[in-house]
């Protein structure tokens, strides 16, 4: 999936040209939407934000080195998820409920007591757990406006677009069969005339 | 841009399927190469997995897995029943560099792309090189697609190709 190594999968987007002196602005904007760790004592199950391209634990962006010599802004989207799997929760809640019933010499717990126990168990398990960490690379070619998100997941893409547009206050447009023609130099008139085309039938056997 | 506009993306999905089907036809007709302006003749082979689908709301699909899926009888039969190529594993030979990529016809999404290895894994400029290779791979695919669309929009030139493709689908050679 990744740009840095292995096989590569990505989704393509287009971003309008940046404003004058964008390096300082973009560095500040990336910092403002930086990744924040999940506090295991909280109820938060998911956190996402920007981190440096080569350090998943650093989210300071220096305007002076923000753009590579080849014109790219490289950064990563970090998504942490701290969610106790249902099966794990059930096993620990059952264990605690049995302990409680035994010490109190009871058959079973009341619904309210069970709900309270679930909350307690969840708190304890969250403190003992590490979040699942996802890192998604982003390569934004500033001179051409082409941006690549190195993930093929539609869920990741949806979250990315939302956070990107909020961060940079600009629209992100997915590149597809029609827009790629315009990006590769076809005129708007030519691209518009695509609407006159209808699907071809190459087979001779009527379906 | 159609981007997130699903209706527009759907409206032109047929172009992507026609493009990959034409690529198959053209690769057979020319003996495995597509001429491009920027990269000269690019070798094109279909590898490992080929998916064909009908268009429209209710899609019927066939997937062929073989060393040379475009040569498989199942793939030919799918073409004869009106299916077009929806996803393909392409092996592209651009001079000194060879790429492998899964291409989705409806979105032109690039997945599982294997880039040629040129630098060592610890070379500081590896990332720059991989970005350049991704640029090149994308440019090759885009150029072939743009070439197809221009041909498709030019009825005088497209007409004979359409007839040749129909004959090819019906069982004649490319």
Image: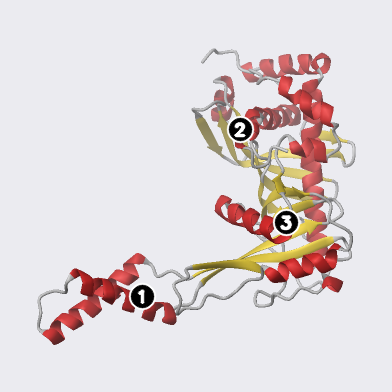
Residue position marked by numbered label 1 in the rendering: A122
- In depth, the one of A96 and B24 nearer the eye is A96
Residue A82 seen: yes
Q: Do marks 2 and 1 share a subunit?
A: no
Q: Position of residue A64 (x, y in %)?
A: 86, 73
Q: Where in the figure is residue A55, as x and y percent of width and height?
A: 69, 75
Neighbour tally class for label 2: few under 14, some 14-19, many 20 plus, Cα within 10 Å:
few
Q: How much space separates mark 3 and mark 2, taking CA atoms?
A: 25 Å
Is residue A79 at least partly visible in the picture? Answer: no
Tell me the element at label 1.
helix
Q: Chain of mark 2?
A: B
Task: Give how far apart the Cα atoms at labels 1 and 3 are.
Answer: 37 Å
Q: Which residue is mark 3?
A: A169
Q: Residue at x 76, y 64 (%)?
A: A74
Left or right of residue B1: residue A68: right
Q: Quadrant of residue A196?
A: top right
For discs 1 and 3, the disc positioned in front in the rendered view: 3
């Amino acid at each position: 999936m990744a740009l840095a190594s292995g096989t590569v999968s990505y989704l393509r987007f287009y971003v309008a040209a940046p404003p004058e002196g964008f390096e300082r602005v973009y560095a500040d904007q990336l910092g403002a939407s930086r990744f924040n760790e999940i506090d295991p004592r909280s109820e938060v199950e998911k956190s996402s934000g920007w981190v440096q391209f080569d350090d998943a634990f650093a989210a300071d962006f220096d305007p002076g080195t923000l753009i590579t010599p080849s014109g790219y802004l490289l950064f990563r989207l970090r998504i942490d998820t701290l969610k106790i799997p249902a099966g794990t929760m059930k096993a620990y809640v059952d264990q605690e409920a049995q302990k409680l019933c035994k010490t109190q010499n009871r058959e079973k717990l009341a619904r309210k007591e069970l709900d309270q126990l679930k909350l307690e168990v969840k708190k304890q398990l969250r403190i003992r757990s590490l979040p699942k960490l996802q890192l998604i690379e982003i390569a934004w070619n500033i001179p051409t406006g082409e941006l690549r998100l190195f993930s093929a997941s539609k869920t990741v893409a949806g979250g990315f677009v939302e956070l990107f547009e909020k961060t940079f206050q600009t629209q992100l447009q997915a590149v597809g069969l029609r827009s790629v023609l315009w990006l590769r130099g076809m005129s708007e008139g030519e691209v518009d005339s695509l609407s006159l085309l209808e699907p071809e039938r190459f087979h001779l056997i009527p379906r | 841009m159609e981007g997130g506009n699903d209706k527009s993306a759907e409206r032109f999905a047929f172009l992507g399927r026609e493009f990959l089907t034409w690529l198959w036809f053209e690769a057979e007709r020319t003996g495995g190469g597509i001429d491009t302006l920027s990269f000269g003749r690019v070798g094109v082979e279909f590898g490992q997995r080929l998916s064909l689908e009908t268009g429209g709301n209710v899609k019927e699909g066939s997937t062929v897995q073989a060393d040379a899926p475009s040569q498989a009888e199942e793939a030919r039969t799918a073409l004869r029943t009106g299916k077009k190529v929806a996803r393909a594993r392409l092996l592209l030979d651009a001079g000194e560099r060879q790429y492998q990529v899964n291409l989705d016809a409806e979105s032109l999404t690039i997945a599982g792309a294997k880039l040629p290895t040129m630098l060592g894994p610890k070379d500081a400029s590896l990332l720059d090189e991989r970005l350049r290779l991704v640029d090149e791979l994308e440019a090759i695919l885009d150029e072939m697609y743009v070439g197809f669309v221009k041909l498709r929009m030019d009825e005088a030139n497209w007409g004979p190709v359409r007839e040749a493709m129909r004959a090819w689908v019906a069982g004649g050679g490319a």
